Image: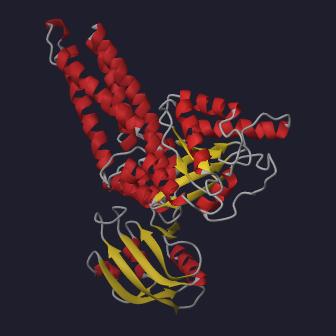
């Protein structure tokens, strides 16, 4: 990308609307827009002011009014990109939008690449890299929780914490490297005890940030919820009830669901990814067996597992299902298994109590308290949704909580954690300062890559090309 060009693009969604906005950014933005503007000269107006006038079509030997418009002016450096910016608001006609872009290009602008406005904001110091990535997250956010995390990151709370950790490491690393310059004088500038204490604290902090990725990713992309159980237990009926649509085929034929079916539902601002899986049972049907195997793999990746128990079944806690749930609970993860007693509208209270007793004996305190529902009639489904919100923990996320939701940041934090842990080992082993400083420098570099204090052209290209044009 050539950062000296004046660029333009439509910044509102594609299609017809009441209003569309074309953004122009660059050192010559005012002069170039003035060529097609009938109204106050934009080169002479104050920053952060809006002006009514007309955009002119001065191409093809004509000079006619294209549309009535409002131009909003932002002078460098107090604009989104840090450059001179003009935002032209016109009527949302597709023709007007396209023709205005053609006129701007014919008068010296260049069409912006995806993410080029935000990239310029980063290059000009208006945003760091983590804040720039948060812009895309704000645009793509679909729930209140994901929006709050993205806004917190865009405001800089996350970057500020990363910079604090980086500055602490940089100070210690500087003192250690200073010792190397006076190695012959046997001078110690950094207390090893103090350094070890700080390294342990940083290790704990980085581990905490890294561990927050599971929740942050769930907020951003949806809490993965796997629905498992025997065939005909009512899994597909429950999925349909939760999403409010006939998403899955419901039948009393065993093995109807041969593969997993996924859909999302927004429950009071929290996004859940619901996965209806093939019924668990011993089978000689090769296709059904593959579906069951996929079901178990889906369950292994879930944050919450809804174990559907058929209160009409003679043996709702059959050996196959119990073995599968036991294997899931052996995993070292935050996964929660929530037993859901289905078809309680047709089961006797004695039968329901008997299943509860069996669950207590099987779970031995490892299962969450069961929920009683009828997926067919909707009875108890509201209580189930409340439990889902509670178990996800996302409803309790505060706007000021720092959660990692970006995969790139997660990988950098993992590497930084590994480096600081090597520093702790080196300090405990009494290794020389130059080796300790090397591990500290590596930790600093990994943290710096998150906010963009250290980066490469490939990383920038990979990040900004995923943005929409006009942002």
Residue 153 appearing in the image: yes
Q: Quadrant of residue 28?
A: bottom left
Q: What residue lies at 50% left-to-right and 29% top-to-bottom?
A: 364
58 above or below 438?
Answer: below
Answer with the quarter of the image where residue 351 lies.
top right
Foreground pick, 79 / 366: 366
For the view shown, which residue lies furthest in the front direction? 350
- In depth, the one of 178 and 345 nearer the eye is 345
Q: Position of residue 312 (x, y in %)?
A: 69, 48
Residue beneath the point at 73% across and 49% down: 232
Give residue 64's position: percent from left, percent from top. 53, 93
Left of 469 or right of it: where is 402? Answer: left
Above or below, 68 relative to 25:
below
Q: How is the image coloured?
A: secondary structure
Residue 266 picture location, percent across and down = 52, 60
Residue at the extreme right of the image, as rendered: 285
Residue shown at 85% from the left, 36% from the top: 286
Quarter of the image for residue 13 reads bottom right
Q: Give the x, y percent position of residue 54.
A: 44, 90
374 shown above or below 283: below
């Amino acid at each position: 990308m050539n950062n000296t060009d004046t660029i333009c693009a439509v910044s509102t969604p594609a299609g017809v609307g009441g209003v569309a906005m074309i953004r122009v950014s660059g050192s010559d933005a005012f002069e170039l827009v003035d060529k097609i503007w009938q109204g106050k000269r934009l080169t002479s107006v104050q920053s952060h002011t809006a002006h009514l006038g007309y955009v002119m079509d001065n191409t093809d030997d004509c000079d006619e009014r294209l549309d009535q418009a409002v131009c909003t002016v932002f002078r460098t450096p107090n604009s989104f990109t840090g450059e001179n910016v003009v935002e032209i608001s016109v009527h949302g006609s597709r023709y007007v939008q396209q023709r205005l872009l053609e006129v701007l290009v014919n008068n010296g602008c260049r069409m912006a690449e995806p993410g080029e406005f935000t990239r310029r904001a980063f290059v000009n110091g208006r945003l760091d890299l983590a804040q720039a990535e948060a812009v895309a997250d704000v645009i793509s956010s679909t729930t209140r929780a994901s929006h709050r995390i993205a806004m917190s990151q865009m405001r800089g709370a996350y970057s500020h914490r990363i910079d604090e950790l980086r500055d602490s490491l940089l100070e210690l690393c500087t003192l250690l490297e200073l010792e190397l310059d006076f190695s012959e004088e046997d001078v110690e500038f950094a207390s090893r005890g103090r350094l070890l204490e700080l390294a342990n604290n940083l290790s704990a902090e980085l581990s905490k940030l890294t561990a927050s990725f599971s929740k942050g990713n769930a907020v951003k992309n949806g809490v993965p919820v796997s629905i498992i159980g025997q065939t005909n237990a009512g899994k597909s009926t429950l999925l349909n009830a939760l999403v409010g649509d006939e998403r899955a085929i419901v039948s009393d034929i065993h093995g109807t669901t041969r593969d997993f079916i996924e859909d999302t539902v927004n429950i009071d601002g929290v996004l859940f990814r619901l996965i209806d899986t093939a019924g668990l049972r011993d089978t000689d049907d090769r296709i059904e067996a593959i579906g069951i195997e996929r079901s178990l793999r889906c369950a292994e990746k879930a944050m919450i597992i809804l174990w559907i128990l058929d209160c009409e079944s003679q043996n709702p806690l059959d050996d196959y299902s119990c073995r599968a749930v036991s294997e899931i609970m052996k995993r070292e993860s935050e996964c929660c298994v929530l037993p859901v007693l289905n078809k309680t509208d047709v089961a006797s209270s004695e039968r329901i109590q008997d299943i509860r007793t069996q669950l207590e004996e099987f779970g031995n305190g490892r299962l969450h308290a069961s929920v009683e529902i009828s997926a067919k009639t909707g009875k108890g489904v509201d209580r189930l949704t409340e439990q889902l919100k509670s178990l996800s923990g996302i409803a309790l996320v505060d706007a000021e909580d720092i959660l990692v939701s970006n995969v790139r940041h997660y990988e950098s934090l993992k590497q930084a954690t590994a480096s600081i842990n090597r520093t702790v080992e080196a300090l405990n082993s009494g290794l020389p300062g130059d080796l300790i400083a090397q591990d500290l420098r590596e930790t600093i570099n990994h943290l710096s890559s998150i906010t963009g204090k250290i980066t490469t052209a490939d990383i920038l290209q990979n990040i900004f090309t995923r943005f929409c044009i006009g942002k």
